Every structure is written in structure tokens, then in C-alpha cells.
Amino acid sequence: MSVVENRSDLPVLPAGEPGPPERGDAARNRALLLDAARRLVDERGADSVTTDDIAAAAGVGKGTLFRRFGSRAGLMIVLLDEDEKIQQQAILFGPPPLGPGAPPLQRLLAYGRERLKFVDTHRALLSDVGRDPQMRYNAPMMLHHSHIRLLLDAAGTTGDLDTQATALLSLLDADYVHHQLTDLGRTLQELGDAWETVARKLCGS
Amino acid sequence: MSVVENRSDLPVLPAGEPGPPERGDAARNRALLLDAARRLVDERGADSVTTDDIAAAAGVGKGTLFRRFGSRAGLMIVLLDEDEKIQQQAILFGPPPLGPGAPPLQRLLAYGRERLKFVDTHRALLSDVGRDPQMRYNAPMMLHHSHIRLLLDAAGTTGDLDTQATALLSLLDADYVHHQLTDLGRTLQELGDAWETVARKLCGS
């Protein structure tokens, strides 16, 4: 059994080999632990949540957490992975303006604000991932780049689209967003407005 | 004596406490080692230069290198620091279009191309520095942010200038530039052109 289980067709974070099928208690405990972890992270932020907290909130033993996820980091990666997939679904198939159906620039602006909220919530783990230069340019992270690039293109943006997508993506970097919010006292609203300014200029709107 | 000596009035990288004055042989050996290291790094790239190479090229013993700089990393930090100061002088006081005297947009475009060359040459050490989130937002790194922001402002750029400076600065990130040049086969000319596109759009020109 691998430390991190990943059975989706759309891997978002590299999550090891899929393990054998889980049944009964194992699958239920896994779901209980993930639900508890998500709830606690939402309430307190990832940095303040321990494996003891998660096991207690899930009503299972701490040994079960380690059997299911290998480590606290293993559980957090699965959590991030699942949340990335939920956001991806919303981006690709959800209602406009984030999903299809709105004009490209409107989708781009909605994406920026949604992603800012996401990186704020998932800052600690995204920051770990972003610090590894190999991880920064891997396939999962490039999905966000591709989405921005596609919308820039659809909005009729001139010039080198990859570079402009990189510039926009840099403003959604977990460390940058954290620095702006925590050290400089800016708000997600302000960062979203600033993202909109840059996006509009690049699109020429 | 601190590992890293730094006696300029314009510290560019945090380089520890200044050591006591050097005299005679010590100062000459220091200069010989820095000159040799700079020459070898220019010829081969930082990753291919060893302390043995540097000591041999400087005509001094390897023990002298370690007495002067503490470690290979210590020498490389001093080298980066000195080169950052040389570039800073050119930006602040050198001839246009990089230095004062050219219109702000022209200075901004010249800065982008010069800085791309610099980060390409100094990639290995800048990459180390950039991986530490504390270092990414420290005073030295923010000098580049301030310079870009100042030129955006002087060029009459609308909207949140800090955010737009961050977006431009992200395209000068050492890991990003290295990835573009090495993995994607792009050229400094292409990256400079792409930087110009983004800079012009943000300035509204």
C-alpha cells in the first residue's frame, strides 16, 4: 500500500502509486479522517492542526491515521489533491463566470479571485510544493498556467502568452499571497482587484 | 573574522558582520580569488567551478580560500554581492538607457534585458537565495522591485504598482529563467522580448 492513495483520473499532485482497493472500515476511516482534517484546517489554518486533533475529531485512533496516510504530510497532500480536483471541476465544468459560459476575460478575473482564496487556505502545503524548483514546473502546477494561457488566448491577448500567463500566475504564488496578507496587511479583495488590473491590461481591455 | 566580508555602503546581499580591516597579503589574496572565481564562472558557469579550480587559477593555496571566505558558498555570495553592486551602480548612475537620462519605459526595457543576463550568469546562487521565502522579500531583493516600481510610476502606469512590479519581477526569477533557457530552449533575446511585451502593456504604451 502506498503512503498516498490517488485513484482519480485527473492526478493533480504527484501522489504515488495507487494502492489496492480499500473496503469497509478502511475506506470509511479514510473519509472520516479527511473530513475531520478539512474541517479543522478550515477552522484554524493548516499550521495549527496536529495528527492528534485530526484523529480525535474523526473519532479514530492515531494509528489509523498513520496506517491510512503514512504521515501528517501524506494526509495534507491528499487533502490538497482532493481540493485541487474540486476546484478544477469548478473551473472546467462549473457554473460561469468561473466555469464555461462567461466571456474569457470574465472567466479569467473569476479564476484569479477564486485561486487567491484557494492559495490562502492551502498556503502551507502549496508553499512546500512551490519551494522545490522541480515541482514548480511540473504537470499539476502547469494546469493553472495552461488555464490562464487558454483564457488569455480566447480573450484575444497579443504577444507571448506563456510569459504573460507566468506573470499572472506569479501573483497567485502561495508565499507571495501569504506575505501580502500577513506582513503587509492587504486583503484578498485588494489582491483580487490588483490581479484584475494586470489581467485587463494584458488582455488589452 | 566573519565568514563573509562586506565593506560596501550598499549591502546587496546579507553578508554578515564586517570583519576587521585586511592588509597586504590577505587583501591581495582575496582579490586574486574573487577575480579567478569570476573568470572561471564566466567561462564555465558556477556549477562547474570547484574550490580547487579557483585556488589554482588564483595561484594561492586552497587553505587561503577557506580562510578568506569560509566555504565555496561564502565566496560565491561575496561574488554575487559584488556583481549586484556593479549592476546597481550601472542602473542608478550608469549611462542610459539602463541608467538615468532615457525615458522611463526605455529604462525599464533596458533593465529587463540586463537583469535577464545577470540572472542567467548568477543562476545557481540566486536560485538558492530565492528558495528561502524569507529571502525573497528581504531588503536586497526588494531593491529590484523598487526600481521597477519607480520606473512604472515615472512612465505613468495606472493601477496597483506594487503588484505590477511583482509580476514583472517574477519573469526575472532565476529558476524561471533557467527553466526557460535550459528545458524549453528559449533564448535571452526571446525572454527579453517577452518581458518588453508585458512591460509595455502594463505601462499602457
Image (cartoon, coloured by chain):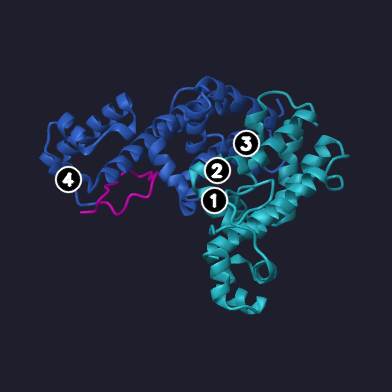
Chain colours: A blue, B cyan
Question: Can marks 3 and 1 be said to lie on one chain?
Answer: yes
Return the disc, 3 or 2, that comes first in the chain's sequence. 2
Return the disc, 1 or 2, that comes first in the chain's sequence. 1
**Up-down: is A88 above or below B71?**
above
Alpha carbons under labels 4 and 2: distance apart? 43 Å
Residue stretch rendered in magenta on the structure:
A1-18
**Residue A78 or A179: which is nearer the viewer?**
A179
The crowd level at tag 2 (other Cα within 10 Å; few <14, some 14-19, many 20+) is some
The residue where tag 3 is placed is B166
The crowd level at tag 1 (other Cα within 10 Å; few <14, some 14-19, many 20+) is some
Asked if the residue at tag 1 contacts the one at tag 3, i.e. Cβ–Cβ closer than 8 Å, the answer is no
**Residue type beneath disc 2:** Arg
Q: Secondary structure at mark 1?
A: helix
In the shown orientation, is residue A98 left or right of residue B169? left
Q: How far across and down, in percent of the image, does residue A35 sit?
A: 24, 30
The residue where tag 4 is placed is A22
**Residue B60 or A36: which is nearer the viewer?**
B60
Which chain is home to disc 4? A
**Residue type beneath disc 3:** Thr
The crowd level at tag 4 (other Cα within 10 Å; few <14, some 14-19, many 20+) is few
The residue where tag 1 is placed is B129
Which chain is home to disc 1? B
**The N terminus of chain B lies in quadrant:** bottom right
**Residue type beneath disc 4:** Glu
Asked if the residue at tag 2 contacts the one at tag 1, i.e. Cβ–Cβ closer than 8 Å, the answer is yes
Report the residue at 66% width, 35% height from top. Answer: B165
The residue where tag 2 is placed is B136
Report the residue at 53% width, 54% height from top. Answer: B128
Asked if the residue at tag 2 contacts the one at tag 4, i.e. Cβ–Cβ closer than 8 Å, the answer is no
Residue A49 lies in the magenta stretch: no
